[in-house]
Amino acid sequence: MKMIHCADLHLDSKLNANLSKEKARERRTELLDTFSRLVKYASENEIKTVLIAGDLFDKKTVSATARNTVYGMISSNPEIIFYYLKGNHDDNAFFEAPENLRLFGSEWTSYRLEDEGIVITGVELDDDNSSSVYGQLMLSPKDINIVMLHGQLSDYAGRDRAEVINLGELKNKSIDYLALGHVHERKTGNLPPRGEYCYPGCLEGRGFDECGEHGFELLDIDVKERTVSHKFIPFAKRRLHQVNVDVSGVMTTVEIADAVSEALEGADIPADDMVKIVLCGKVDVECEKDPEQVRLRFEGDYYFLKVYDETKLAVDYDSFLKDASLKGEFVRILKADESLDEERRSAIVRCGIQALSGEEWQ
């Protein structure tokens, strides 16, 4: 028997941190379409069970379009049973749940799959129950037990207000597969004595803190052998990439763009993807650099591209020691000022040299 385990779809996200209004609207549509494609994948591959381990939506109030799309995809595939466990972002956003949608609450709820010996159990963690639920979990060792939770494993640093999951309290509970949500990158590990835990990660990357491959987990349960295996299925429409480009020693925007071009060629990124270029390294204080020009050169090559300048300034003070110009005197005075740290001093030197050279400050 096969199941899909997905989480953190965050449908109806604003997506306006990086994207224009038009592209944000397009990406919101794409995220909805990815959910629709997931349901079609399940139908075409005769997968009868879909586990949604939290944050199906990005906020408690969602648009009618998002709600109706999800409702429609679920209700129009009655042969698939969807198990939806609310996360810390979303809410049970349906005024009336489709007949093939199974929900959870603040107490453990179990669903037994007929004639399969498989039980799906879950609870939605909150401030009131998060410390007491572990002792209330009673599972039969004779069953194949799938447990659903949404929160932050205590082994990992928390991102926000999600409840903490104490993995130690879930050991020796006859869990075969712990289907988790909340962490946006794939993570797996052992859950003694017989199980595993898994975060499938988010279904689509939304920001550049979610770079890389995204998709869902495909479970394969052998009832006779009493085994649960799983594998990751890449499924996102677009990937996000961060490309670090060391531009140490360059002196012009043209040279920076050439270095970026070389890095992008080596990265071999599809044109439909989203790219963040990070300029790094040390550049001379007199380096002429214009990150906006670099962005304009490459933005047409990808669905979206941005450029971050994280370079540090390198000032060769010795080269100004015998410079009789106003520029040399300015640099010597700053070098002697012990109240400034090196980063601040270098930035002031750069601004001053640009001003003295008749250039705009950057």
Image (spheres, helix red, strand yellow):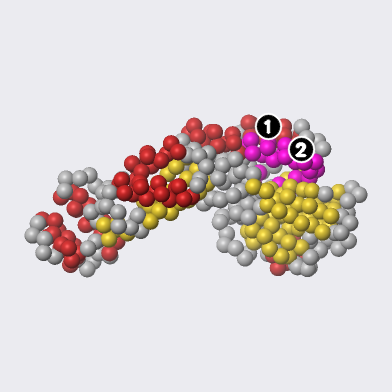
Q: Give the residue pinned by disc 1.
A: 68
Where is 92 relative to 353, above or below?
A: above
Q: Is residue 269 left or right of residue 284?
A: right
Q: Which residues are magenta?
A: 32-56
Taking the spot 76% from the left edge, 52% from the top edge, the residue there is 219
Taking the spot 41% from the left edge, 40% from the top edge, the residue there is 298
Q: Amino acid at mark 2?
A: Glu
Q: x, y percentage for residue 270?
A: 52, 42
Front of the two marks 2 and 1 = 2
Q: x, y percentage for residue 222?
A: 84, 55
Q: Secondary structure at mark 1?
A: helix
Point out the residue furthest to the left here: 324
Q: Secondary structure at mark 2?
A: helix
Taking the spot 75% from the left edge, 45% from the top edge, the residue there is 50
Q: Foreground: 169 or 315?
A: 315
Q: Earlier in the sequence, mark 2 or mark 1?
A: 2
Quarter holding residue 318: bottom left
Q: Foreground: 147 or 315?
A: 315
